[in-house]
Amino acid sequence: MFNEEFETLPRPALEALQLKRLKAMVERVYSRVPFYRQSLDKAGIKPEQVTSLADLQRLPFTCKQDMRDSYPYGLFAAKMEDIVRIHASSGTTGKPTVVGYTQKDIDTWSELMARSFVAAGAHKGDIIHNSYGYGLFTGGLGAHYGAEKLGASVIPMSGGNTKKQIMIMKDFGSTVLTCTPSYSLYMAEAAREEGIDFKGLNLRVGIFGAEPWSDSMRSEIEAKLNLSAIDIYGLSEIMGPGVAIECQEAKQGLHIWEDHFIPEIIDPDSGAVLPPGVKGELVITTITKEGIPLLRYRTRDITSITYEPCVCGRTHARISRMSGRSDDMLIIRGVNVFPSQIESILMGIEGVEPHYLLIVDRKENLDILEVQVEVDENIFSDEVKHLQALSHTIEKEIKDLLGVTCKVRLVEPKTIMRSEGKAKRVIDNRTIDS
Amino acid sequence: MQVEQISIFIENKSGRLAEVTRILGEAGINIRALSLADTSDFGILRLIVNDREKANNVLKEKGFTVSKTEVVAVEVPDRPGGLSEILLALDSKSINVEYMYAFVERCGENAVIIFRFDETEKAIKALLDNGFNVLAGERLYSM
């Protein structure tokens, strides 16, 4: 472990620490951020009324829209002269959400990312090949600083230029790969075309995040890249990568670093806090951040939480593998569908590649879901009936498991766009008449 | 006694078939026989060519999904009832024809038909037992 004392803190001590830090945080945002002063006043709660962790539930939520409304610096709780780094989300659906870090925030982030590396099975001496994008996106620099804090050798590749990535991985003897799960498979494909076998590389661990993926995709990645694949979670609003990570001992849920973040799971519709084990939206309160602390930030990510002890000895709660985002969720004829659920079904079918695209349309007020699947040599047959049987199998599995009727369209290899960052899985062409 | 056929997956959109034939043409590959099975979404183009390896390689390089299949080429008497006799001989051994298509050239007095069977060896035996002429691949590729 990177910080054994804090990573194995007995729960009573952990909760006492959380309460102390939460109280200080509420004080901080109340006195420094007008938005929070107003929202706490409106909710009728004063900082001194937070006396137990249960009081957290009385605090108002913070939403992505609140961050947009405060664009760019309105939610910052530190003076601009103390902000040493600024990142922002991609802002695909509007203005980017901007986050600022003080030096202490960067130090915390680096430590949590270093802890995450160790939990994933990396150590000092590893050569960390970092293919997360560098720039405004937090992935690249977050992993970079964590790798340095750990004392590993980091190769700051960033995304793109896949042929060179593979050459460097081979020549530099990279032992740990960090990138999005979809990009890792793209690399595997590119390597095969270059005649390079991942079995001949030194890679041992892959740390994949920034998009939801399934357990079956993990098996695919582990088989194709010949490494142990670990799921990492993070978001720029809270910190960046390294908010939570799977431990290599269990690979059963992601430990969320509870000495810095307090997680809750809520019903996305009612906002009510749900008990452990029940799926809902993850809400996170940062309790040590200086630059842009957030109270009860609604992540839109769907997961569940468990406080059961873990074989690895870490006492921090675990959140389950993200099953999707509440804003990525497709509602097709009234049924909630996450792309990751369809991915899981596709990958459970022998020979089917993990490249897929969901296209949603509306015809005569009816939602139509088309699932595009690439046909490669593993599933191709010279007989029409075999390919049609494959389409029907996929359609039936999706219908049986998700309750949604879809049409499978078999397409030629490489016709589904590959991504060097977050994969685009859905094209929603529906225009809803108001 | 078997003939190697290559099959190519083609999305049902304009220009794809032209693309395949262009690639083969530029590589100097001659198509001896062909059949296209089509559905509303995709087609399977099946070809007998003079150079299978080369055809396979150039198409794969261009990103097409290609597979090889063993098929059987049979001479069929070019007269009424000629094909029927062959099919009856196969039926008597309960051999099912997956698909079939005609070869473009004639071989002496006979036509040539390409068959795809589930049980290829058994089919060849039945055909030979009944006195039909099954053509070797090499003969077909160079016809």
Image (cartoon, coloured by chain):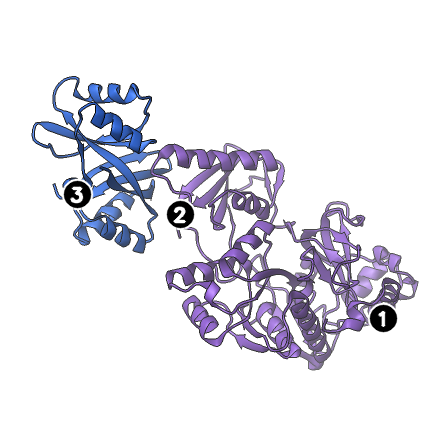
CB atoms of marks 1 and 3 within 8 Å:
no
Secondary structure of the residue carrying tag 2 is loop
Say if labels 3 and 2 share a chain.
Answer: no
Decide: is B58 above or below B34. below
Snapshot quadrant of residue A433 = top right
Labels 2, 1: front one? 2
Write down the residue under mark 1.
A24
Amino acid of disc 1: Ala
CB atoms of marks 2 and 1 within 8 Å:
no
Residue most extreme to the left: B108
Disc on res. A376: 2
Labels 1, 3: front one? 3
Shade of chain A as shown in the rendered figure: purple
Amino acid of disc 2: Asp
Snapshot quadrant of residue B18 = top left
Instruction: Count neighbours of disc 2 (C-alpha within 10 A) and say few if under 14, some if 14 to 19, many if 20 or more.
Output: many
Closer to the camera, A96 or B91? B91
Disc 1 is attached to a residue of which chain?
Answer: A
Instruction: Count neighbours of disc 3 (C-alpha within 10 A) and say few if under 14, some if 14 to 19, many if 20 or more.
Output: few
Distance between the alpha carbons at the discs numbered 1 and 3? 85 Å
Write down the residue under mark 3.
B138
Left or right of A173 on screen, residue A337: right
On-image quarter of the C terminus of chain A: top right
Closer to the camera, A265 or B71? B71
Residue B30: image x %, image y %? 16, 46
Shade of chain B as shown in the rendered figure: blue
Residue B54: image x %, image y %? 23, 53
